[in-house]
Amino acid sequence: MTMTRRTLTHSALATAALVGTGTTAKTTDTDVIVIGAGAAGLAATDAVMRAGHSVVCIEAMDRIGGRVFTDTTTFGVPYDLGAHWLHHIALNPFVDIGKSHGFTMYKQPDDMQAYYKGKPLNPTDTIALETEHARMFKALFDSAQAGNDRVATYIRQPQTEWTLTSEAMIGSLSMARDLENVSDLDWYIAEEGEDWFCKQGFGTLVAHHWADVPVTLNTTVTSIDADRDTVTVQTSGGPIRAKAMILTVSQGVLASGTLDIRPKMDSALVSAISDITLGSYNHIALQFSHGTIDTPADTWVGYHLTERHNGSPKGGAVLTNSGGTGLCYFEIGGGFGHWLESQGEQAMIDFALSEMSDVFGHDIKNGFIKGHASRWGYEPTVLGSYSGTIPGKANTRSALRTPIANRIFLAGEATSIGEQGTVSGAHKEGLRAAATVSALLA
Ligand SMILES: Cc1cc2nc3c(=O)[nH]c(=O)nc-3n(C[C@H](O)[C@H](O)[C@H](O)COP(=O)(O)OP(=O)(O)OC[C@H]3O[C@@H](n4cnc5c(N)ncnc54)[C@H](O)[C@@H]3O)c2cc1C
């Protein structure tokens, strides 16, 4: 029989329906169970089906996408609560996927606009900022290329007026952690390239692309038990038994211990789970009436940072007028971002609006409509933003791929080496795990 995408979907949907009803303790049998319907889990589920195996994908949330999700109701325009940038388009399959589905895909404008004391930076200061940034990048490159895997704090020296601003760009806003927790090698192995956007939202694109993939929503996996022949999971919808599993939950969930996994993991895998942690990164979205922020669409604006909060750069940067909609993403991360997140959504909005008023002038408050802040650290099935290795442990990502009992295979942004912390990396890791599982079942 020729397996088309549609026939595969329907047969798997029938299996999934057994799980979703969940009123009896009858065990559902399937070839493969995928836990999590984020970028990795969705790609894995589709690939396993295409290889001709039955599959059940279980997702705790009431929607698919995980950390890539577009909310269109809060502001009436696309608002990506998680991933927004399509990083490194030369490696990223989602630009072509978006074009093939008719989405509006476009390149991020090239230059960052920097502000100082409420005004766009003058040419002298612009050069000073760029020079400082280039110096820090070179220091990290040189160290990693020399074979080091060090705490990145050495790039703070020698200090200039722009050191703190550059430090925030590299630490909190790129690695989602302060330099004290950044491994220069982990920073170095992350591929960099041209970034694009999807006007309708990255989450809209991912959800649309995988709309036919069957997922059992609102179902939480609580325990996993693998033996020589099978893996059995307990879920809020009843038990499921499979020949193999692809586990795509975040590092935050793995480290939290809320999933009871047996048999005991290999010690290299246990170490990798504690050495690769989720950082803190959030969007504080502020909507302004058109024309309030006088920048071209999608201008990335940095501003002069001068203070620390418990050692962490106090402040962020802002993507203004996203897609020409008037929505601004004030970005916050690292230790200060983590602290601000703990203060609650209103405190986050107040801080972002105050910083933006200092940058663009206090009149912008007259054009402010409303705000919203993501708080991924408090999302129980994620517990953070994206992964980084602790200094000295950049090479442990490969250990995360160590199977458990040769039945359970981990996949997600954190198992990617080179595209860690991205949707594209998670997607490819889902495909990698699916290929491994399909080979095992062949
Ligand atoms: C604020 C923010 C901004 C970001 N910006 C970008 C960006 O611009 N570009 C980019 O490429 N990447 C970005 N990222 C990173 C990107 O979103 C992630 O790398 C990627 O989406 C991770 O996909 P994943 O499949 O590995 O994990 P997830 O998306 O976390 O998927 C795992 C799924 O497992 C589910 N789950 C967890 N526990 C259970 C359980 N017990 N039972 C059932 N289901 C469970 C979760 O609900 C989740 O849906 C950003 C992330 C954040 C938080």
Image (cartoon, rainbow, N blue to C red):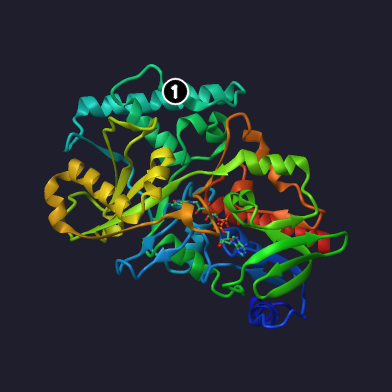
Residue under the image location 71 percent in, 43 percent down? 270
Left or right of residue 17: residue 281: left
Q: Is residue 331 above or below residue 237?
A: above
* Percent position of residue 73, x then y: 34, 71
Q: Quadrant of residue 80?
A: bottom left
Asked if residue 265 lies left or right of residue 340, the reply is right
Q: Quadrant of residue 174?
A: top left
Residue 211 position in % (x across, y down): 54, 73
Residue at image point 44% right, 45% down: 194
| Image location of residue 231, percent across then percent down | 79, 64
- Residues 93 and 417: in front is 417
Using the image, determine if residue 197 lies above or below residue 188: below
* Residue 298 percent location from the top left of the image: 30, 51
Q: Secondary structure at mark 1?
A: helix
Judging depth in this view, the residue of 93 and 79 nearest the camera is 79
Q: Nearer the viewer, residue 236 or 354?
A: 236
Residue at the top extreme, as displayed: 158
Say which amino acid is labelled 1: Ile
Taking the image as shown, residue 435 lies to the left or right of residue 128, namely right
Read off the residue under disc 1: 155
The N terminus appears in which quarter of the rendering? bottom right
Q: Residue at x 67, y 80 (%)?
A: 22
Task: Residue at 32% x, 39% y: name it.
Answer: 315
Furthest residue in direction right, as rendered? 228
Quadrant for the C terminus, please.
bottom right
- Disc tally is 1
Answer yes or no: is residue 382 visible: yes
- 30 and 429: which is toward the camera: 30
